[in-house]
Every structure is written in C-alpha cells, then in structure tokens.
Image: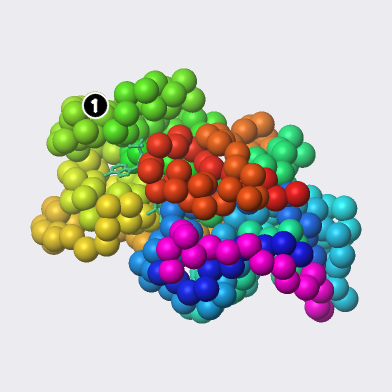
Amino acid sequence: MRCYQLPRTGAGIDALVQVELPDPKPAHRQVLVKVGACSLNFRDLLIIRGTYRAPVRENLVPLSDGAGEVVEVGSGVTRVKVGDRVAGCMFQRWFGGEAPAEAHKAALGGGIDGMLAEYAVLEEDGVVKIPTHLSLEEAATLPCAGVTVWNAMMEHAKLTVGQTVLLQGTGGVSIFGLQFAHAAGIQVIITSSSDEKLARAKALGADHCINYKTTSEWEKAVRAITDDHGVDHVVEVGGAATLARSFGAIRVGGKISVIGVLTGYATELDSALILARRVNVQGISGGSMQMFAAMARAIAWGAIKPVIDRVFAFSDVPAACRYMASGGHFGKIVIRVA
Ligand SMILES: NC(=O)c1ccc[n+]([C@@H]2O[C@H](COP(=O)([O-])OP(=O)(O)OC[C@H]3O[C@@H](n4cnc5c(N)ncnc54)[C@H](OP(=O)(O)O)[C@@H]3O)[C@@H](O)[C@H]2O)c1
C-alpha cells in the first residue's frame, strides 16, 4: 500500500516521504479499513514540527483523522462488518468513561501509525459508523476536532439551550463548535483575525463576531455583549496569547475547556483570575469512542455537514500541511486518499 511516513517528530514538512509498505492484516478484534480520505489537524503540524507533548513513534504514518470502508475483519469482531463506512477514533483504546492514563500510547498518528495510508488496521472498538448523509471526505474531518469540541461542550461544560459559548478563531475545532452550538440552541460568540471569515461564521449561525486583530481586548467586547455577565463556557484553543483573556470573558462559575496551543504553551496567569470568578478549568484531550458515537448521532439528526475548506490530492500532502500552517483556512482541510 501507499502511505506517508515521517522519519521522526520534528523532522519538518519536507521530511514527509511517500513509501510502499505491505498491506496490513487485521488481528483478533481488529478491522482493515480502505481509507477514502483523511483530514489535517493542528496536532499533525505539532508532531511534524516536534512540539507535540505526547509520545510519537519513529517512521510514523501521520494523521489521526481518516474515514473509509471496512474491507476485512479479524476474528471475534461483532460491532462492524465488511462494507460498513467508518471513521477511526483518535484514541484507539478509549471506549468510554474517563480517558485511560496511557491513552496517548494508542493514539493514531502519534503513539501508533495513523490514517495517511491506503489501508489502516483499527481496533473494532476504535471505529465509529459514519452518518449516511456524509461523504468519506466529510466524515474524515470528525475524529479529532469534532470529538474534542463535543467533549468540551457536551461533557465538560454540559451546555444547555440559551447558554453562551465563546469560540476562538475559525479553524477546525471552533467551526465544529459553532455548528454543534447552533444545532443545540446555544448562543455563539466567535473571534477571528478576518472579517471575511467572521461573515462566513455569521452565515453558519454565529450570534456575535469579534475581530481579535482590530479588537485586541476582545474579552471586554465579550463582557459588553453579555451585559457584563460573561460567557458560560470558553473553548480555549489559543493557548499562551488567549488564556488570560479567556478568564476576562468567563462568567462567575463558568467553565474553560483548555484544548489548544495555537499561540504556544507557556503563559503567566494570576491565580486571582481563577479564584475571583470561581472558574472551572479543565484540560480536554480528544474524546472516547462513545463520545464520538454520540456526536455522530447528533450530526445525523441535525443533518450537519462539516465545513471543508479545501481538498488536496494524496500526492499534495506537503502542500496541504503548508496551507494549514498559513492559517488561511476556514474549517477543515481534507486529503483524498482513494
Ligand atoms: N486537546 C485536544 O485533544 C485537541 C484536539 C484538537 C485540536 N487541539 C488544538 O486546538 C487548536 C486548534 O486546532 P485546530 O485543528 O482547530 O486548528 P486550525 O484548524 O489550524 O485553526 C487555526 C485557526 O485558529 C485561529 N487562531 C490562531 N491564533 C489565534 C488567536 N490568537 N486567537 C484566536 N484564534 C486564533 C485562526 O483563526 P482565524 O483565521 O479565524 O483568525 C486560525 O485559522 C490547536 O492548538 C490544536 O492543537 C487540541
């Protein structure tokens, strides 16, 4: 089979090489998936650049996200059958409940080989059937960004109708957050560096839009929008440059899901920020297979279509990575495999 490999984490985009490997075989309770499409996540760039904080194997087949068709099942498989259309779960051994401490050791495109290949062997409990209204390209966008923001909004913050969430930027995580919030009657305040992207977010249902370049103290704008109350939930993807401002935007007793590091990891925080507003701060790392299945049901019910910015050919993976690094995208970047 054709696949890409990254010789070691930190090797950079130019080190990605296309290679031929023997077709893999599914073992007991595993399935073989013919991959139709993959999608990129900022995590994949962190791994390629060597700034990811979890184990990464050598000669890694990159990417956590992919979808395809089951073409063979190993012994003992009962959850899926040949012909089913499935997406892989980023964490192959996190069925439900709390994440196991060693979850990252079995993370696609990190601790273990990922989806950027013509075929992938996955655990039967590490796949989810995809909604019938989605193409494989659309379904390939779900596993990392979709499940993570679902976990943040529905499991951590337990948002309900009429509450307000703050989403940062218009990348994969935030645009899924916008779509889920819109479907669930949750008010959205979203930020972006681009007025044009904010107009697109508005068209998708965003209630309030703030340009974080022209309004650098955007947390004050959030407080003004919410009558100085603050938002119920912040989906924190910015990291170093946004975290302190997120405390300015949250309501007393609100929840901040710490997900991303788009602007770096380390920052200074005044603990009074947490104390004074009694903020619940939770690190979020992906989600379980059961969360993915719940999200897939919601996507099917709401006929939600993931927002794909561009689809690249399998031969153009380095260009796709550079495009993601440029930050020019809105929503998800997809790679067609089959
Ligand atoms: N913890 C987890 O399990 C998990 C899962 C998924 C993602 N993540 C993390 O979450 C972050 C987002 O991931 P992604 O895949 O959605 O990335 P992405 O698609 O590459 O999103 C990039 C977008 O983020 C926005 N952005 C950049 N700097 C910003 C800032 N200072 N303030 C607000 N927005 C800013 C920009 O939006 P505009 O162009 O609109 O300005 C940019 O286009 C990454 O750090 C990623 O590693 C973590």
Which residue is nearer to you in this view: 310 or 280?
A: 310
Q: Is residue 259 visible?
A: yes
Q: Position of residue 103 (x, y in %)?
A: 53, 74
Looking at the rendered structure, the secondary structure element under dot 1 is: helix
The image shows residue 90, relative to residue 324, as above or below, that is below
Residue 78's image quarter?
bottom right
The image shows residue 137, relative to residue 161, as above or below, that is below
Q: Which residues are magenta?
A: 11-31
Magenta segment includes 234: no
Determine the residue positioned at 78% across, 57% down: 34
Label 1 crowd bin: few (<14), some (14–19), many (20+), radius 10 Å: some
Determine the residue positioned at 73% across, 71% down: 21
Q: Position of residue 337 (x, y in %)?
A: 70, 50
Q: Which residue is mark 1?
A: 225
User: Where does the N terminus fall, quadrant-wise?
Assistant: bottom right
Q: Position of residue 158 (x, y in %)?
A: 45, 48
Q: Is residue 126 visible?
A: no
Would residue 144 appear left or right of 207 to someone viewing this image? right
Would residue 202 appear left or right of 16 to someone viewing this image? left
Q: Position of residue 198 (x, y in %)?
A: 36, 26
Would residue 262 appear left or right of 60 to someone viewing this image? left
Determine the residue positioned at 19% across, 45% down: 245
